[in-house]
Image (cartoon, rainbow, N blue to C red):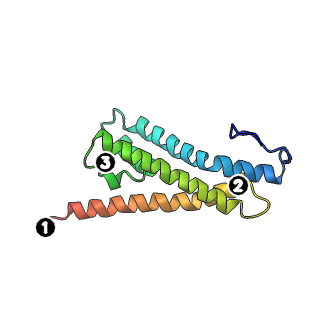
Amino acid sequence: MAIGSIFDIPDDVVPDGIRHHRLMVRRFGPLIAIAVAAAAGVLAAMLLVGSNSAIRGVPGFILAVAAVPTLPLFGVPVMGGNVRWLLALVSSAALWFSVGVLAARRSTADVVSSWPEWRREYLRLAIGVWVGALLGLAVAATVLSVNL
C-alpha cells in the first residue's frame, strides 16, 4: 500500500470482498458519522435562519442539539458568541468522529461485516448521545424555570 490517499487499497485485498468491506467501514465510518451530524446541522440552520415561529424554531433547535450535542455544555442556548459556537462545533465533531470509530470497531469485530452492521452500531451509540443531550436540556430548562 502506497503512502497517500485513504482511497488506496492494498494489493492483496479482493475488490468487493470481505476484507474490502471491513476496510471501507473502518476508513469511512467516522467520516460518515460526521457527515450525518453535518447534514442534521444544515437542516437545523435552514429551519432556524429567519424563523419567527415555534413551528420552525422547536424542530430546528432540537435538530441543532442533535447535530451539535455539546452546545449545552458551552451555554450556547443561553449565551452566544463565536468562540462558544466554535468550541461546541469542534468538540461535537470530535464526539461524532469517536462515535464513528467505535461503531466501525464494534461492527467489524465479526469476520463478515459491512455497512448494515455499522449502521446498527452507529444508531445504538447515536441514540444514546441524542437522548443524553436532550435530557440535559430538559433538566436545565426545569432547573432554570424554578423560582427560588
Q: Count residues near mark 2 (Cα–Cα under 10 Å), then give few for <14, some for 14-19, many for 20+.
A: few
Which of 132 and 28 lies nearest the eye of the viewer? 28
Quarter of the figure with residue 125: bottom right
How far apart marks 3 and 2 lie (CA) works out to: 35 Å
Mark identifier at residue 117: none
Q: Position of residue 80 (x, y in %)?
A: 27, 43
How far apart marks 1 and 2 lie (CA) works out to: 50 Å
Q: Earlier in the sequence, mark 1 or mark 2?
A: 2
The residue where tag 2 is placed is 116
Point out the image quarter for the C terminus. Answer: bottom left
Q: Count residues near mark 3 (Cα–Cα under 10 Å), then give few for <14, some for 14-19, many for 20+.
A: some
Q: Is residue 123 left or right of residue 9?
A: left
Q: Position of residue 19 (x, y in %)?
A: 80, 53
Q: Is residue 134 visible?
A: yes
Q: Is residue 75 left or right of residue 37?
A: left
Does dot 2 land on a helix, a strand or a loop? helix
Q: Are marks 1 and 3 in contact (CB under 8 Å)?
A: no
Q: Earlier in the sequence, mark 3 or mark 2?
A: 3
Q: Earlier in the sequence, mark 1 or mark 3?
A: 3
Does dot 1 land on a helix, a strand or a loop? loop
**Which residue in the rendered view is the most extreme toward the bottom?**
148
The residue where tag 1 is placed is 148
Q: Is residue 63 visible?
A: no
Point out the image quarter for the N terminus. Answer: top right
Q: Is residue 46 left or right of residue 27?
A: left
At 66% from the left edge and 60% from the top edge, which residue is drawn?
A: 105
The residue where tag 3 is placed is 76
Count of labels shown?
3
At 33% from the left edge and 32% from the top edge, which residue is drawn?
A: 50
Does dot 3 land on a helix, a strand or a loop? loop
Tell me the amino acid under the disc marked 3: Val
Which of 129 and 63 lies nearest the eye of the viewer? 129
